[in-house]
Image (tube, rainbow, N blue to C red):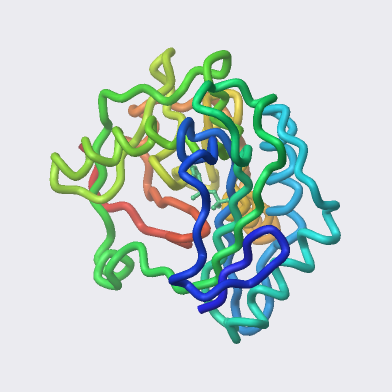
Amino acid sequence: MKIYIDGKFYDEKNAKISVFDHGLLYGDGVFEGIRAYNGRVFKLKEHIDRLYWSAKAIWLEIPMKHAEMTKAVVDSCRRNQLRDGYIRLVVTRGVGTLGLDPNRCAKPSVIIIANKIQLYPQELYEKGMEIVTVATTRNLHNALNPAIKSLNYLNNILAKIEAHNAHVEEAIMLNAEGYVAECTGDNIFAIKGNQLLTPPLSAGALHGITRGTVMDLARESGLQVSEPNLTRYDFYTADECFLTGTGAEIVPVVKID
Ligand code: PMP
């Protein structure tokens, strides 16, 4: 496997970053998870746009234009002969001093790993997943906005640990007001009759690329799509529930709490 770091490709064992990189020291950076299917990168423009929005929201200036970044992702797939797989695109604040001041970081680093992913066992897709609501509240917009795909995923990781402690793979995260926000690494949907419902971005849902794709397809197929504030009640009483995410794709949910 060849890994892209700042314009060069390295073997896996030589693909290393500094211990002074603020991505490591402070989780200061942003990322994307992207898929390739059948020799094509799925919704690459949408992912690149979201990456630059995440970066802009944390005052991080990516030292490459959108087009260069797009090319670097495609080149990474070609180098690794990856026709079907997962691409992790990471931009860190770069090497700095031990203090958290981002101004002391000379230049952001860009890392691209083009590899495989298998998040959940096949059985979950066939039999459906059980999920629980966890106590860890989704980040507040005015603390760390959930719209930013930052390298600080502790909020989601803590919720994931709670899910695992309850012997399930995913968790419903509520926002501070008690509305359903999303899951730890996936968006959530309910179907009620002819309606497809999913929490709004304002409730703390990530602007999921899979979410957007599912909403487009649902509209085309005649479902009524809306994004109202949703509570657990709406999921308990739904006809169907499923999760969406780049890594997970679409996962049916058969039991909640
Ligand atoms: N919510 C969170 C918190 C995520 O990290 C992700 C991405 N894994 C998603 C939702 C799904 O977004 P996408 O469909 O763009 O992968």
Query: Farthest front residue?
Result: 97
Quadrant into which the C terminus falls: top left
Closer to the camera, 226 or 128?
128
Location of residue 184 in the rendering, given as x and y in whole percent from the top left corner: 39, 41
User: Which residue is rendered at x = 50% and y = 27% of the image?
Assistant: 98
Where is residue 216, by image quadrant? bottom right
Q: Is residue 191 visible?
A: no
The answer, for residue 28, to whether it is visible in the render is: yes
Vertical arrangement, residue 169 with respect to residue 149, above or below: below
Where in the figure is residue 14, as x and y percent of width and height? 49, 69
Q: Is residue 137 left or right of residue 215?
A: left
Residue 166 percent across, percent down from the top left: 14, 40
Of residues 48 and 28, the one nearer the viewer is 28
> Which residue shows up at 50% across the image and 79% down it?
1
Q: How many marks?
A: 0
Residue at the location (43% across, 37% down)? 153
Residue 238 vertical placement versus 103 (above, below): below
Point out residue 16 in the picture as x, y percentages from the top left corner.
50, 59
In the figure, is residue 245 to the left or right of 62? left
Q: In front here: 127 or 117?
A: 117
Q: Is residue 39 rendered to the left or right of residue 136? A: right
Q: Is residue 230 depicted above or below 84 in this figure?
A: above
Compared across the picture, whether 30 is left or right of 45 comes to left
